Amino acid sequence: MKIAIIGAGNVGGTLGRRWARNGHTVIFSSRNPQSEEMKRVLAEAGPNASAASVRDAAAQSEVVTLAAPWQAAKSAIQSAGDLSGRILIDTTNPLKKDLSGMEVGGDTSAAEQVAAWAKGAKVVKCFNNVGFNVMADPRFDGKSALMFYCGDDAAAKDVVRKLAGELGFDPCDVGGLEKARIIEPISLLWITLSIELKTREFAFQIIRRG
């Protein structure tokens, strides 16, 4: 599968490197694809990875992963051009800078705004409720970390479910894209707990009876 990564920071870099090592064709996007930072990311990702402009990366890919900071999300999508028909994984978290709450929430969500900006894209919310260190290794004593996801297109959600599962997550379908309104605040809970517990090495699970 061809996957574009918009934002090659901690989250985008981690996901992209792991997917490339799993055999997917990964195109990291950057304003400067020849930068030293991008060369380092590509070296770590291996031969299945390359770099291109945001527009070129998106045009060549079946799946586009939005891993830019929330404040840059709209401009990143605009730079990507026409995303209609493509699966767009939204990993963003619209957190206030002081972590006192969410910039977007209640009667809408970041994912719904992303869908409005990326007309015709099949938006799936995923990879936002744990830190990048857990994305690098979602296994805890033989158990998989939970990964919530939601979206309105069943086929697109199935693709994202498989991409999450192959990384070692336990994917959990929460429903339609409006459910991002309850998924996104979980990121704030994870960050708050990481501060209180003084560790980032934890994740969430669902304990099932029967």
Image (cartoon, rainbow, N blue to C red):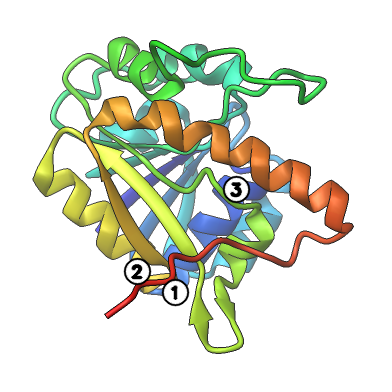
Q: Please name whichever residue, 171 or 21, is drawn nearer the observer in this view of the structure.
A: 171
What is the tally of numbered marks visible in this picture?
A: 3
Disc 3 residue type (three-letter): Val
Q: Contact (CB < 8 A) between labels 2 and 3?
A: no
Do callouts 2 and 1 mark residues in contact (Cβ within 8 Å)? Answer: yes
Measured along the vertical axis of the image, is residue 26 above or below residue 121?
below
Instruction: Answer yes or no: is residue 61 visible.
Output: no
Q: Is residue 50 left or right of residue 13?
A: left
Q: Which mark is residue 11?
A: 3
Question: Quarter holding the N terminus?
Answer: bottom left
Q: CA distance from mark 2 to mark 1?
A: 5 Å
> What kind of residue is marked 2?
Gly
Residue furthest toward the bottom? Answer: 142
Residue nearest the observer in this picture, 187 or 90: 187
Image coordinates for residue 156, horizontal then vertical, percent: 17, 45
When asked about the image quadrant of residue 210, the answer is bottom left
Q: Which residue is mark 2?
A: 165
Q: Secondary structure at mark 3?
A: helix
Is residue 125 in view from this perspective?
yes
Residue under the point 50% across and 33% down: 184
Type of the residue with mark 1: Gly
